[in-house]
Structures are given as C-alpha cells and as structure tokens.
Amino acid sequence: QTGVRVERQPLSRYTTLGVGGEAEIWFVETLDQLREAVSAPYRILGGGSNLVVADEGVPERVIRLCGPLAKADLEPDPQLSTAGDIVTGWVGGGTPLPGLLRKLQGLGLSNLEGTVGIPAQVGGAVWMNAGTRFGEMFGGLHSLELVTPQGTRTVTPDELDWGYRNSGIPRGEIVSRVRLRLRASTPPDVQARMTLADDARKGQPKMKTPGCAFKNPQGVAGKGAGRLIDEAGLKGTRCGQAMISPEHANFIVNLGGATAADVHGLLDIIRRQVPVPLELEYELWP
Ligand code: FAD
Ligand code: EPU
C-alpha cells in the first residue's frame, strides 16, 4: 500500500563478513513504510557489520532503512540547543556512520569522533552502543525515535539502561531516527582525536570480518578477549574458509567462500579452549 520496494536477495551482499543466505528485503524510506513493514515478523538490518547470517538465510522479512531514513539533518535545533550542547535535527537510522563522522569533522562538531572506523549505520551503532576506548555512540545522543508494531516512541538516553556495547533498547524496537548532542570544537581538533582513535586500529585485519567476535570481560581489570584467545594459542586456526586472524585473535576473517557453519565452528573452538567465559558480541541470524 505504501509502495515499499521488496526484493529477495542473498544477505551475503549486505554483511561485511560476506556470508548469509537469501531473505526478503524491504527497502523502507518513510515512517509510513516502516509501520507497514513491522506488521509481520521482521528483522532489522543495519550496515551488516556485526552479523553472522545463516547459510539458509532467514524466514522473516529483513528491513533496510534507506532514502530519507538514511539521511542526516545536521542543522542545530534552536529550541533544543543550549549554551554547551548543539542538538541536531533528525538523523536517519540508515545513515552510514563513516560519512556522518566526516561531515561532523568538517563542521568542527565533537562527541562522536571516537567511533571512527566502525563500518555501521547509525541505527545499528546505537543499538549496540558501538564504540572504542575513545568514545561511544551514547556519548553523542540527545534522543532516539523507536518504532515497534505497537507504535512509535521517543526516548532520551537516561530512560535506557545503556552501557558497554549495550543500548538497553528492547529487542524488536527499531531505531528509526536520532537527534545528536554535539559540542562545538574545530575541524583540526576533531581530526586530531579521530587520528588517535584510528591509530588504535593498526593491529586489526583489513579483511572481510564482522569485527570483534567477543566482548571484553567487564568489571575485572584484566585481559581483553583478543589477548585471552591469543594466549590460548588460537591465532591462525582455520575452519573451512574462516580463520582466527593472525593479526588480532578476536577477529574471525573470511578467506573467501567461508560459510556461517565455518564461523560457528571457530566460535565453538574458542569457547572450549579459552578458560574464561566470553560473551558473544556478534549477532547470529537466525
Ligand atoms: P548490523 O550488523 O546490521 O546489525 C547488528 C544488530 O543491530 C542486529 O541485531 C540488528 O538487528 C540491529 N540493528 C541494526 N540496525 C538497527 C536499527 N536501525 N534499529 C535497531 N536495531 C538495529 N564495533 C564496536 O563497537 N567498536 C569497534 O571499534 C568496531 N570496529 C569494527 C571494525 C570492523 C572492520 C567491523 C567489520 C566491525 C566493527 N565493529 C565495531 C562491529 C560493528 O560495526 C558494530 O557492532 C555496529 O554497531 C554494527 O552496526 P550495523 O549497522 O552494521 O548493524
Ligand atoms: N592483544 C593480544 N593479542 C591479540 C589481540 C590483542 O595480546 O591477538 C592485546 C593487545 O596487545 C593489547 C590488548 O590486547 O595489549 C588490547 O587490544 P586492542 O588495543 O586491539 O583492543 P581490544 O580490547 O582488543 C577494543 C574493541 C574494538 C576497538 C578497539 C580499539 C572490544 C571487544 N573490542 O579491542 O572494538 O576497535 O578496542 O578501541 O571491545 C568491536 O567491538 O567489534 C571492535 C573491533
């Protein structure tokens, strides 16, 4: 009814790992189309940079935000902005994060530059509270618009129980748009902080991957997941065409033609051989 484009396609085209079978993809451009899309069982796809999708694909419709829901209005909102905080217009959940950060750098707007190098969409990055030790998404959010089959609500970060790699948004709620909370800086200063955050990625592989497999254990000052997997002697371990990166042990890379089953095989090996329980960071579909 709302004219939404629907196509059956392999999800391997939409994941940074390059793995995943077919699904019905709904290319949603407006809030009306989004409301129609959530009227039957659905999943929401962002940049596909944290996903391991089954080789059989998924039975639910897969929603992809595009068009106006993938654009950013960075004009400060005079009503919401204060002396210290610049609050933007709406930024669509489908907006690619890397391009958004380049624009913010050019405008000399700070708070999100620590997330440089994360190949996500804004909605997916907010859903995970993606970040690095230099900053995370919730460091630059003013409010979020969330869509479910029951309706649409707008919340502020203090209404959510967010933390490390966790937004506290209930599963199934779609981040349709957000407003950013930024601080005035200068383009060179924002660039300098981006370069610092980028430098911390020098040891990460430049291959097809969904980023870090496991979260770093929290609470105890100690070793990260990468170091623990490394100390278990697992760098370079292969399962079919998937491999634990010899550069950084918390990254699984696709050597070309890997399957989801190959990746699951490596996750099992890691769980069996690392003496500390690790919490998965990937999202597994289904
Ligand atoms: P997807 O992978 O498409 O989806 C992930 C989850 O988010 C799914 O559950 C999906 O349903 C949900 N989702 C997606 N869009 C929405 C939406 N609009 N509303 C609600 N839910 C949604 N992560 C870090 O935190 N820090 C890093 O430094 C980092 N570096 C990375 C480097 C590389 C090279 C790669 C490939 C990944 C890296 N990641 C990193 C992991 C990944 O980028 C993040 O987890 C990111 O948040 C995933 O966002 P996405 O848009 O790609 O979501
Ligand atoms: N290390 C090893 N062996 C390895 C990997 C790492 O000994 O194989 C050691 C390093 O030498 C270093 C320590 O572990 O002393 C930490 O490593 P690194 O600086 O690479 O950071 P990390 O904790 O492994 C985290 C995030 C990354 C983020 C980087 C940079 C998690 C799970 N990972 O990695 O996020 O890009 O910091 O800020 O929190 C992601 O979440 O997907 C991700 C890539």
Image: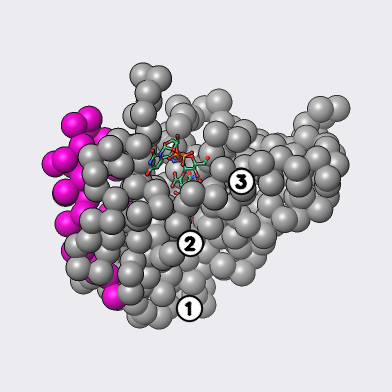
What residue would you read off at disc 2?
206
Respond yes or no on whether mark 2 lies under 8 Å from ligand 1: no
What residue would you read off at disc 3?
199
Whichever of callouts 2 and 1 sits on the residue coming sooner in the sequence is 1
Q: Quadrant of residue 194?
A: top right
Point out residue 280 in the picture as x, y percentages from the top left corner: 29, 42
Q: Secondary structure at mark 3?
A: helix
Q: Secondary structure at mark 1?
A: strand
Are dots 2 and 3 in contact, CB under 8 Å? no
Q: Which residues are magenta?
A: 257-286
Q: Seen in the image, is 206 located left or right of residue 98?
A: left
At a point 69% along the width and 37% down the height, the residue shown is: 111
Point out residue 68 in the picture as x, y percentages from the top left corner: 64, 65
Point out residue 13 in the picture as x, y percentages from the top left corner: 41, 74
Whichever of callouts 3 and 1 sits on the residue coming sooner in the sequence is 1
Q: Compare residues 13 and 256 and report the one nearer the observer.
A: 256
At a point 75% along the width and 55% down the height, the residue shown is: 103
